[in-house]
Amino acid sequence: MDAATSLLPPVTARPPAPAPGGPVAAPGAPAAPAYSGPLTHPAAEATAMMGMIISPGPGGRRRKPDPEVEAEAEKPKIPRGAKVVQLRAERTDKGYKSVYSELTRPTIFSRIMLGVRGAGEVMITFGLIVLLFAAYEVWGASAVVDAHQDDLDQELSQAWDNAPTVGPTPTVSAEAAPAGPVGRLYIPRLDKRWVVNQGVTPADIRYAPGHYPNSAMPGEVGNFSIAGHRNVATFWALDQLVVGDPIVVETKDTWYIYQVTQEHVVRPTQVEVVAPVPNYPGATPTKKMLTLTTCHPKMDNYQRLIIHAELSSQEPRVPGQKPSVLE
């Protein structure tokens, strides 16, 4: 017996139970004292309480776990109405079948929804392209127009500076007006200024307002008519003009100040708005008029917005000076 064992208290063994059919104590004989001590060593009992030793069941045998009970306890609780999908692939004659094949198999409804979704994505993409193009037409083209306006402004200034100054400048008729810049157009209310080009073809008015070749020249009796695109760089806000607003035209020798007299919307075929007497074709002109035309409404061209103005005053053009309405 080693020292560790000698420190443990003595263990008293349980008396064996009488075997079935064995001798029975005689009547009157003293009964064997009942054993009330521990079943095992105290240290072993403490270890058993910690789960290290399985206590024997009835008859001294260990309790065996019930597989059915344990399997039932380990089953997850599935909510009512939920669908269970096996986690392992199913083996078939053609190979293994995916565990998600039943869930991912296309149906008529899924095919219809796929087509609708694809058509929607195409329409959204097309709409974005249209919006980007419209944004470029409205705002992106302004930079291009401004750049060409600078070139036309320099061209006009050079033409005026190189023109002979001996004697009065003869008035040029509309039929003999040369191609190129005609003058400058100012609209104080809109804080805008443009160089007016000669002609109203798409090429003439691409980057500048254009003068109708058969209409009067600035300051002449008749109708000095100008056309322009309805974009941000040109006549976008022309509908903001009201009766009495000034419109100024600058030529080489003179400032012409017109005042707005009428604003109205017409059909594209109503060309009488640029007649010598606006809206009265064939009549003999007696006034000095100005007419501005552009598309209407914005972003469309099935109508025309018309602004009529009448000459109210004129001043000699002096380098470095402007009319008071432009100050």
Image: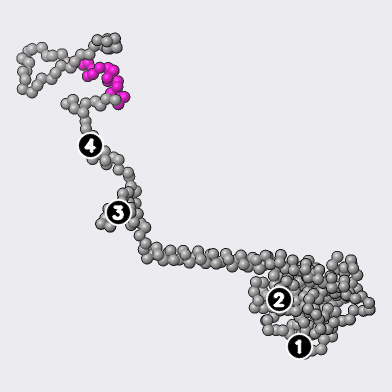
Q: Residue at x 15, y 13 (%)?
A: 33
Q: Residue at x 72, y 84 (%)?
A: 271
Give the CA separation, mark 3 to mark 4: 34 Å
Q: Residue at x 53, y 64 (%)?
A: 124
Pinpoint residue 155: horizontal percent, then vertical percent: 81, 71
Q: Along the polypeptide, which appears first: circle 3 or circle 2? A: 3
- Residue labelled with disc 2: 203
Q: What secondary structure is found at the residue carrying circle 4?
A: loop
Residue at numbered disc 1: 281
Looking at the image, residue 11 lies above or below residue 230: above
- Disc 4 residue type (three-letter): Asp
Q: Secondary structure at mark 3?
A: strand
Residue 257 in view, yes or no? no
Looking at the picture, how far across and down is residue 233, in whole percent? 72, 68
Residue at the limit of the structure toward the bottom, as seen here: 282
**Badge 1 density bin: few <14, some 14–19, many ≥20, Cα 10 Å:** some
Residue in view at x 69 percent, y 70 percent = 231
Query: Is residue 3 shown to the viewer in this render?
Result: yes
**Crowding near pointer 4: few (<14 within 10 Å), some, many (20+)?**
few
Label 1 vs 3, first from the N-terminus: 3
Q: Position of residue 318 (x, y in %)?
A: 91, 70
N-terminal-most mark, 4 or 1 = 4
Q: Amino acid at mark 2?
A: Ala
Q: Which residue is mark 3?
A: 96
